[in-house]
Amino acid sequence: MKIIELLIEHHNYSLNRPFSYIYTGDKPVDRGFRVLVTFNNQELVGYVLNVKNTTKSKKELEEELGFDIFEIIDVIDSSPLLSEDLMELADKVSEYYLATKISTLQAMLPPSLSPRKSSLKAPKIAYNQYVEITKYDEEDLTFKQIELLRLIKEEGSVLKKEIKQVSILTKLIEKGLVKIRKVEKRRFEIPTYEQPKKLSLTEDQQKVINEFKNSDDDVYLLEGVTGSGKSEVYLSLSEEYISKGKSVLVLVPEISLTPMMMRNYISRFHDKVAILHSELTPAEKYDEYRKIASGECKIVVGARSAIFAPLTNIGLIILDEEHVESYKQDTPPFYHAREVAIMRGKMHDAKVLLGSATPSLESRARAQKNVYHLLRLDKRINNQPLPKTTIVNLADYHNIDKESYIFSFKLRESIKRALANHDQIILLINRRGFSSSVNCRNCGYIFRCPTCGIPLTYHRSDMMLKCHHCNYVEPAMDNCPECGSKYLMRSGFGTERIEDEVHRLFPEARTLRLDSDSAKIRTKIPSIVEAFRRKEADILIGTQMIAKGHDFPDVTLVGIVLADIGLSLPSYRSAERVFQLITQAVGRSGRSDKKGEAIIQTYSPSHYAITMAARQDYELFYKREMESRRAQSFPPYTYLASITVSGRVEDTVIDNVYRLIDKLNEELQDDAIVLGPTTPFVPYENNNHIRVILIKYRKPQNIRRVLEKLVSANSQKGTISLSINIDPYNF
């Protein structure tokens, strides 16, 4: 008999410990297997942490332990799902982010292998079945059987599904003349690209590569202006590590950027590349994950969760656009791919390379202190100048006329000129939809999401009102539900409205739109990007998806239609986000031999994030923003943790959050500053009221034990739910 110690699939803090079961069956079971168990009268999946043999009987064990012990129902797997180094990584991630171990394991594995009950219905291995000759003998066969046997012999092997005469095939199998051979079918086809001419490295690129190779440091920050050739540095270094027999992990922050990085790596390394990101189907993820685990490929390109790819012998980990917030997971276990990359790099003795034109303040501060090794690419390829940038003050009526309240004189003239020159244009507004809110002019009623309470956005393409937070949708109404008035006003504008305005002002212009609405069909993102690259459109309109990483040589104009979006958000990161977005967007212009131009429209023309982004002056912005962070005791000068308390009854949530604050102040005393409770930007979600506690601290070791103990104790109260987020981006 075996004693099985396992984790239950629920990631409540009170269940974050091993539970013991017994197993008397014949199937092999070991650490890293999933098993089916009964827990609290439910049939659940458990993840095995430890297996011990015992000679004691069930009764003896129960007397020794002091509680009833159950037998597992079944063993699901035939081999461990994670290697020992990935199990060790799961421990490190769980410990750092104060996350339940099971939530970390669930984040690491694809749906088909996840330790949760739903995985049992997820896609499994798919096979093609081929019919092959085992023995050729026409004796005692019918003419039809001979015909089929000769066909199989001539072809060598034939797909079973292509053989229509099933009864004849069955007879040949029974006679031992043919057999069925199963070959695993890959449901994700790696595209093929022509291998481009290999670019010669510039003197600056070669200098950066040499400095990287000759240093013994672990983590590097490559700060390179937009268009300076960071991608070619990544490719050259990857080639170096592959030639040494090492594997390479390449992360990109957005799915919209994955196709470009895919193209770069597949065209250079062909079948050595595997792809992992959230837009793959569960079946495709399963196939790619198993391909990586089998050692068939040496390079993985993917988004945030690809940091857990089962690669072995890793020599290099690259995070492109390291500043982008999508590297931070916004559901438990709330990990940041950058921090996990550094953990994993240390485990494999691998180097970690972070790249960005606008590094996060945390990364740049670490580079200033020599925690990271700072590398620079200060000039564009071919010494091409940065775009000429103009800030247009939308509050000045001289810049606007009655023909368009969205586009200024300056932007309209620049669009007109670029179209006449057959150049391409990018128009950015970081808001999708047609109108950002709808309200009644008669009684003031605002159409809000019933789930989370924020204003619904009107989308004219399908005549729907949509919540951009929780994805709630409802049909657009003609009358106010409160007073019945037909006088409904649509305020604000997004990408749909911009596209509509372009068609009105420039009817000859061909447009494409790239935002999370137009890209709901997963094949749309690469097809839209490639269509624009092939000059099938003159103007690309989009959200932040178009601002980073893309290289369109014929784009000579970037228009940022409203640069203020995000500045008013209640976040200490708002200025940094706006600076990064504008800088990245402006950098899409003038990347080849054509001069570039950028127009920034804003109601805040003197805000430092906008003026410094217009000048592409990261150094000045860094100094200015760091002064603000120091004054307010925000990262990178302190660490942050947030505790979210939620529940159905608002009074219960408020009572519990104040009790928790009192306890935190008592336990932490001078080790931390406890702020709150605050009501978040989305105060109500899934019928739950939400309050947030924010904790600022300088020494993590002093508060982690306290946080873990308090959250674990309070999470056992059934009326509320708690979650803890280490290094939160939003609160």
Image (tube, rainbow, N blue to C red):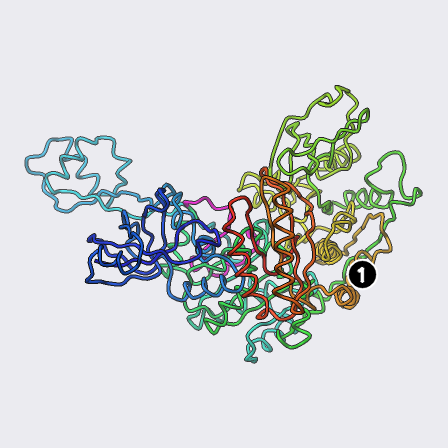
Residue 336 locus on image (x, y percent): 57, 59
Main secondary structure type of the part rendered in magenta: helix
Left or right: 482 as drawn, with respect to 108: right
Above/below status of 518 relative to 188: above
Snapshot quadrant of residue 586? bottom right
- Percent x, y for residue 576? 73, 58
Instruction: Indicate the quadrant where residue 616 lies.
Output: bottom right
Position of 152 compared to 383: left or right? left
User: Residue 45: x percent and y percent?
Assistant: 36, 48
**In the rendering, at what x and y percent does residue 454 appear?**
69, 38
User: Is 440 inside the magenta-drawn segment?
Assistant: no
Residue at 59 percent of width and 46 percent of height: 646
Residue at image point 31% right, 44% down: 127
Which quadrant holds the N terminus? bottom left
Q: Secondary structure at mark 1?
A: helix
Q: Is residue 381 visible?
A: no
Horizontal relation, residue 361 to residue 40: left or right: right
- Picture quarter containing residue 448? top right
Residue nearest the viewer, comparing 605 with 499 = 605
The residue pinned by badge 1 equals 612
At label 1, the amino acid type is Met
Q: Nearer the viewer, residue 185 or 643?
A: 643
Q: Does residue 540 appear in this view?
A: yes
| Residue 439 higher or lower than 35, as above or below | above
The span picked out in magenta is 258-283
